Structures are given as C-alpha cells and as structure tokens.
C-alpha cells in the first residue's frame, strides 16, 4: 500500500526527500564517529526543531555519548529572528570540562547558534562544536563557525523534519517549501 501523505497538500515542492536526509545523517554520523572517537561527548539538541535530526543522526554516531536539550528562542512565531534571545528551557547537565556537540536544525542569521556556543563556553565546556542539518549561509549577520552541516540552502523558508511554521508541520518526514496560500491563510 502506498504511504499516505495527507500533509503533503500544504507543500509546494520538496527540497530534501527522506532518502536525501538519510544520506546526510549517514555521512555526518560517520564523520562524527571518527572525530569523537575516544571522547564521550554531551550531545545537546536545540529544541524543538532539531529533535528529528538529532534522533536519526545520533543513531549513526557510533561513540558513547550523553544527551541533553536546550530551548533557546529568538524567532517568535513568524519567519524572522527577533534578535532577542532567551533561554526557554535550560540544560540539565553541567557542561564544565565536557566536549559538547550542539545539534541544530538550521542556521540562519547565526544569532541563536552564537548565543548557545558562547553560553556553553562561558560555562566551562572543554570544546563546543555544532552539527546543523541546513545552513542558510547567505543570511548570516553574525560570525559563527559551523563545524558540520548537512546541506547549504538558499533564502527560502523551509518546513518539515522538525522545522515548523507556527509550530506546525514539524512531523513531515521530508523538507519542503510551503504553498503560498498556506502562509496567506495565517499571516494577514
Ligand atoms: P537564527 O538565529 O540563525 O537566525 O535562527 C535560527 C533558528 O530559526 C533555527 O534554529 C530555526 O528554528 C529557525 N529558522 C531559521 N530558518 C528557518 C526556516 O527556513 N524554517 C524554519 N521552520 N525555521 C527556521
Ligand atoms: Mg532551531
Ligand atoms: Mg521556529
């Protein structure tokens, strides 16, 4: 039986299929397995967007690790970063002396990632690197190093595989661009 795709009705076109995403996770997982061999990293997922990527990526990362989450919010409910960043939900773990790997869905202006990296360094992490699924490099307004990325993307608002519009559509198994009428329906 063909897999249902009711939610696909909101998508104008796909950018990354489930297969594309799987390939990215395998490639990045292999690299991280090599780079973190002999270490016991603390993997920090950036809620909520990174949860789908984090679960697939870490299954491909064959090293002992621990998991924690942080929720740092800058976006409000729309398309643009507000620039004002606050911790909505903090880590449970003490990062002092730890090799921390931040897992993030997408880097846009870079403000959110820079905020998280600075915070963890300030708290005494031994190393802080990040692995992002998508990199909107052309939109960067602040300098921040992205050590690992799945793919570069242009200046388009993407949804699916964790990434939302108004906290919806995260559960699409692929990544795509919304139909303009879906956006119009909510943004007047
Ligand atoms: P930044 O601080 O780099 O401008 O924003 C990063 C955050 O904004 C990401 O973690 C993500 O949650 C959200 N974001 C940036 N671009 C997009 C996008 O194209 N689609 C969605 N759904 N979220 C995005
Ligand atoms: Mg995010
Ligand atoms: Mg969001």
Image: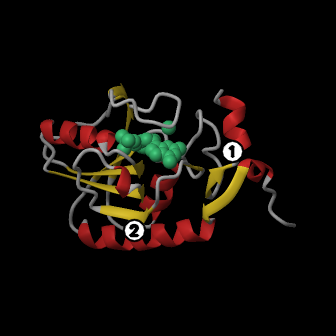
Residue 78, how many percent across, how many down?
A: 53, 32
Indicate the secondary structure of the residue bearing disc 2. Answer: helix
> In the depicted view, which residue is nearer to us: 58 or 165?
165
Indicate the secondary structure of the residue bearing disc 1. Answer: helix
What colouring style does the render use?
Answer: secondary structure
**Is any atom of residue 46 visible in this view?**
no
Q: Quadrant of ligand 1?
A: top left
The tag on residue 180 is 1
Residue placed farthest to the right in the image? 1
Residue 156, how many percent across, how many down?
A: 52, 52
| Mark 2 or 1, nearer chain start | 2
Residue 86, how many percent across, how many down?
A: 33, 26
Q: In the image, what residue occupies the spot 27% across and 37% down?
A: 93
Look at discs 2 and 1 and give the one toward the viewer.
1
**Is any atom of residue 126 visible in this view?**
yes
Q: Is residue 76 above or below residue 141?
A: above
In the shown orientation, is residue 168 left or right of residue 89?
right
């Amino acid at each position: 039986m063909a897999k249902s795709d009711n939610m696909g009705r909101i998508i104008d076109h796909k950018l990354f299929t489930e297969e594309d995403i799987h390939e990215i996770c395998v490639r990045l997982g292999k690299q991280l397995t090599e780079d973190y061999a002999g270490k016991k990293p603390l993997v920090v997922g950036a809620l909520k967007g990174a949860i789908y990527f984090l679960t697939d990526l870490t299954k491909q990362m064959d090293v002992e690790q621990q998991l924690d989450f942080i929720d740092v919010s800058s976006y409000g409910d729309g398309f643009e970063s507000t620039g004002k960043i606050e911790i909505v939900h903090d880590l449970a773990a003490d990062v002092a002396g730890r090799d921390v790997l931040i897992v993030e869905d997408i880097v846009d202006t870079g403000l959110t990632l820079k905020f998280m990296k600075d915070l963890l360094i300030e708290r005494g992490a031994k190393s802080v690197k990040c692995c992002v699924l998508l990199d909107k490099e052309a939109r960067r307004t602040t300098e921040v190093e992205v050590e690992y990325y799945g793919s570069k993307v242009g200046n388009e608002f993407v949804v699916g595989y964790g990434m939302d519009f108004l906290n919806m559509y995260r559960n699409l198994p692929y990544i795509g661009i919304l139909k303009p009428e879906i956006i119009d329906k909510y943004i007047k």
